[in-house]
Image (cartoon, helix red, strand yellow):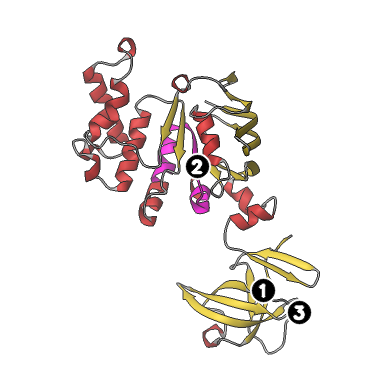
Amino acid sequence: MGIQISHLNKWFNHYHALNDINLTIEKGELVALLGPSGCGKTSLLRIIAGLELPTSGHIFFENQDISKEDIRNRHIGYVFQNFALFPHMKVIDNIAFGLRIKPKKVRLSPKEITKKAQFLLEMVQLEHVANHYPHELSGGQCQRIALARTLAINPKILLLDEPFSALDTKVRRELRRWLTQFHQDIYLTTIFVTHDQEEAMEIADRVVIMNRGVIEQIGSPIEILNNPTNDFVYNFLGDSNNLRIGEKSFNFRPYEIDIQINDISPIGYYPAEVIDIRPLGALLKLVLKPQQCTSYIEAQIPKTIPKIQNLKKGQIIYFKPILDFEI
């Protein structure tokens, strides 16, 4: 099911949480709402779900205006950040819960409900924990069970609110790979909220970057990484150096820098003092103080660069930003 959002606004008393949001999501697309805390991404997700109503504007599901439609009529599946599993129920019963509370006239038979719950367990590759309780599962398993329970009611749109934020780094990475493949298999229109740039870029077909209630940029991960529309987007997507030398201002990432260790400055390079040196895997992380300004910059460079192993604090080297993003 496709989604169209038109001139959507949301006010909380005097706070303008969402400001003239316009967004189209195609059927089967996986879209990330990415931005810092308080940018409005969760408010937008909750309005799409029907948990909040917009102050003005419209939301269309397949050209039908559902802006004021009851949540029960939106055919939405919502996966919460904290899993929201029932601790007193076994896994199989957690998944079957939504099917068992349906009105009698549309409810499946007990046998059919059990069969569907077992099928969903197989789909998320956890059939072996059917008779376990939530407290006996890992965080990653709980998240997959929460997803299976949501899919049991046959939603037309899947909404995920910071689905991996409560998990450790290793589990998050494993689940990101799993979700990407899972989405390809089910081809369900999916929107997920995250503040993790790496997560959004790895999973999403398109990324919507938000800040202070507005959309700053919409595009594929490659489009956004290669062509940030403004300074906020560039800086938000990762560590960056903001440098002003004379009349020139640059934004560049620590790995977008060329280092030369020479006695004479090469043409186009700037001198800088080495303030700190720290190993970072196959790289060295340098803190540099350019001679022409008072600010510091960071550089991440391969240990294989000639003369780098003999580099010392206080030494003068020469650097040049690569792929600079002019302010």
Q: Is residue 129 left or right of residue 170?
A: left
Determine which residue is flagged by label 1: 295
Give me the C-alpha separation between circle 3 and circle 2. Answer: 46 Å
Determine which residue is flagged by label 3: 267
Determine which residue is flagged by label 2: 193
Residue that protrudes farthest toward the bottom in the picture: 263
Of 294 and 184, the residue lying toward us: 294
Q: In which quarter of the image is the C terminus?
A: bottom right
Three-letter code for the amino acid on which mark 3 is drawn: Ile
**Identity of the residue drawn at 46% across and 23% down:** 71
**Residue bounds of the magenta highlight:** 178-201
Question: Where residue 128 appears, x then y in whole percent?
Answer: 21, 39
Q: Categorize mark 3 by other alpha carbons within 10 Å: few (<14), some (14-19), many (20+).
A: few
Three-letter code for the amino acid on which mark 2 is drawn: Val
- Up the image or down, 146 lies above or below 177; here it is above
Of 137 and 269, the residue lying toward us: 137
Label of residue 253 in the image:
none
Three-letter code for the amino acid on which mark 1 is drawn: Ser
Question: Where residue 195 appears, x then y in whole percent?
Answer: 51, 49
Question: Where residue 281 appears, x then y in whole percent?
Answer: 45, 72
